[in-house]
Image (tube, helix red, strand yellow):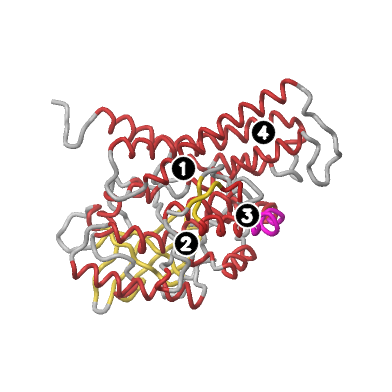
Amino acid sequence: MNTRTLTDTLDFTPAVGDMPLTGKQRALLAQAHALGRDRFAARAAQWDEAAAFPHANYDDLREAGFLRLCVPEAAGGLGADYPTYMMVAAEIGRFCGTTALTWNMHICSTMWTGVLADGIPMTDAERAEHARRRELHFARIVNDGAIYAQPFSEGSAAAAGRAPFGTTAKKVEGGWLINGRKIFASLAGAAHYYGILCTEDVEGKTPDPRDTLYISVPATAQGFSIHGDWNPLGMRGTVSRNLLFKDVFVADDEQLMPRGIYFKGAQTWPAMFFTLSPTYLGLANAAYDFTVKYLRGEVEGEPPVKRRMYPTKQIAVAQMRIQLEAMRSLFTRAIAEARPNPTKDAKMRLYAAHYSVMEGANDICRLAIRTCGGQGMMKHLPLERLYRDSRCGSLMLPWTAELVLDRMGRETLYETGERDE
């Protein structure tokens, strides 16, 4: 791999920190940074205030080719691999958390069916079926600029992988009939297709997570509707309203993975659930960046008053930097190790990285507000929004902070198959 230190070629330090990068990674990071700095940052407050989806940002992402970032080059995409996406997502999150978080849902629809699916065991027939069908989905994104969503939650243990999904798909002639409901469905009303996880409804068979299907539902499908209000604490521009499916027919080719393959993927590729973290690493960087500028008297539109001479401020910035560096180190190690069937140690580091980023982002934002003082809580400055957005990360399934701690403790103390008498 041809790598150089980024400081030789970039005029900024990426959200993931100073690390060796490929030429492709440097170019994509520079492009993401410019988009965020010049366009996304100035708009972030309006999406938050109105709880409105960032359509203008998606126009920019589409124009930059970023909607097809993880579509293979052979299918017309940019062919970014897992670590590259994670780096770029963190950079976008640095300027607009809402954009980064919703973009993740879209990108995962291509990454799961692309590079991750290539590492999931399949029969030859399943592989051929998947290769043919994903061409349809890739073409929609590459040729039409389509946006895909990825709704998980139902208010049950299903999104955490501990129960079958209540949303069901029943096989009928030529396709499937979908019935059920999703909550906290990011991009509700903005996506052209909703890649839902549901349980195959097999007559006489008890629902089982192994029978999970991953199917795309067009926004125009008859029987599909969006309901409810959206007025949350943070990440307000995700517009994560409820989705209702009532006898929604979708064709066979709308399957994003063959039958039973999603469950195998969840067992094979734990890093597929780590992709929410870059947004929050980006938010942590944003809070740190603002605090440094504020204490140096360099915030645009604010009086050029320096506050850097006070030891209490210096200590707080040092604490923030120490925590940020620890988060970056765990994050970059985790994305470098991401692969099918990781070792136990690599999996523990993955959990630790996710927990550290999700909890650490809010802690850094807390320190930022305290350090900048009363001005930090004013809405014309970004810190209070960053604080609210950062608090939401630990709540997100399938890896909430509580579930990660539970997994780490259990998987540390029990080897596979071990039970207490």
Give how far across and how far down residue 408 sits, in percent: 34, 33
Q: CA distance from mark 1 to mark 4?
A: 23 Å
**Relative to 274, residue 296 above or below:** above
Q: CA distance from mark 2 to mark 4?
A: 31 Å
Mark number displayed over residue 225: none
- The residue carrying mark 2 is 106
Identify which residue is drawn at 76% across, 32% down. 374
Identify which residue is drawn at 44% across, 40% down. 354
Give how far across and how far down residue 37 sits, in percent: 68, 54
First along the sequence among labels 1 and 4: 1
Report the side of 97 relative to 405 (left or right): right
Mark number displayed over residue 332: 1
Q: Looking at the rendering, which quadrant does residue 119 occupy?
A: bottom left
Residue lying furthest top? 311
- The residue carrying mark 3 is 33
Q: Which span is picked out in magenta?
A: 34-43
- Dot 4: within a 10 Å radius of its alpha carbon, few (fewer than 14), some, or many (20 or more) residues? many
